Image (cartoon, rainbow, N blue to C red):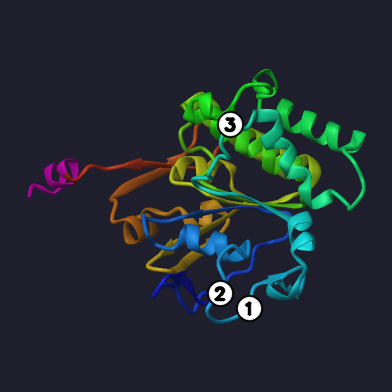
Amino acid sequence: MAAGHGGRTVIEGLDLEIPDGSFTVIVGPNACGKSTLLHTLARVLARRAGTVLLDGADIARLPSKQVARTLGLLAQQPVTPEAITVADLVSRGRHPHRRPLRGWTAEDEDAVARALAATDTAALAERPVDELSGGQRQRVWLAMVLAQETPILLLDEPTTFLDIAHQIDVLDLCAGLHEDRDRTLVAVLHDLNHACRYATHLVAMRDGAVVAQGPPADVATPELIEAVFGLPCEVVPDPVTGTPLVVPLSRRHVRHATGT
């Protein structure tokens, strides 16, 4: 598959299969093509070559509402409509389920209420979104995607703007959605330790290509992390989860250790 922006091809010759029912996390340095890949999988960007298959069918040939009922996308920097309240924004997640001449239903109301509760934003329901903090807005946008109630969720840096406590809350929520409801999640994360802790399938990218993929314990090695990120490190077991814990080595420490 190939995809890009404007006249620039960002990913080319990429071959990737997302395991069904997985919590797949994509990692890699800035500008390596992570978000481009996610947006191409969501049909926000048209691929330039190759095919994107959704449940075995070419996503480009599927009706828009069918795609929207199957996968939801949390973009990296979504644009908030002017003067909209939290409840109104989250309710827009129900659009793919609406039918002509059918009003707002109890099912719609319940889906919105569940999404607000899951993201701890119910108390914000009547507030204008543009008055919220960056972290609050991020949780509200996540609530809108959850209200869509799709079996596949694509999340582009879902912990952006969040403090450490809310980062863990959001990732715990994502893990719960994956485990309890058998959803397939695909997330782009910058924090390698979060990625290793929560992913069931880890994808490492560099320069528009997949360098490695598989269980975090197989992918997150010191050699691969240095090759992908240019970061010398040690990898030790996380004392809480046993998953790989990346301990960066500053270049100053490396020079001291080697005597250079």
The furthest residue to the bottom? 49
- The residue closer to the viewer here, 112 or 38, is 112
Is residue 215 visible to the viewer in this orientation of the structure?
yes
Please give the label number shown on residue 51: 1
In the image, taking residue 233 as reference, residue 79 lies left or right, namely right
- The residue closer to the viewer here, 86 or 135, is 86
Image-quadrant location for residue 176: top right
Say if mark 2 contacts mark 1, CB within 8 Å.
yes
Q: Amino acid at mark 1?
A: Thr
Is residue 175 visible to the viewer in this orientation of the structure?
no
Q: CA distance from mark 2 to mark 1?
A: 7 Å
Upstream in sequence: badge 2 or badge 3: 2
Question: Residue at 77% across / 68% down in the picture?
Answer: 63
Image-quadrant location for residue 197: top right
Q: Does 200 sit above or below residue 224?
A: above
Task: Report x, y in % for residue 198.
Answer: 59, 42
- Badge 1 density bin: few <14, some 14–19, many ≥20, Cα 10 Å: some
Q: Which residues are magenta?
A: 252-260
Task: Report x, y in % for residue 22.
Answer: 68, 54
Q: Could you tell me which secondary element the residue under label 2 belongs to? A: loop
**Front of the two marks 1 and 3:** 3
Q: Could you tell me which secondary element the residue under label 3 belongs to? A: loop
Q: CA distance from mark 2 to mark 3?
A: 34 Å
In the image, taking residue 110 as reference, residue 144 lies left or right, namely left
Q: Amino acid at mark 3?
A: Ala
Magenta includes 207? no
- Badge 3 density bin: few <14, some 14–19, many ≥20, Cα 10 Å: few
Question: Residue at 62% across / 65% down in the picture?
Answer: 43
Upstream in sequence: badge 1 or badge 3: 1
- Badge 2 density bin: few <14, some 14–19, many ≥20, Cα 10 Å: many
Please give the label number shown on residue 83: 3
- Which residue is under mark 2? 47
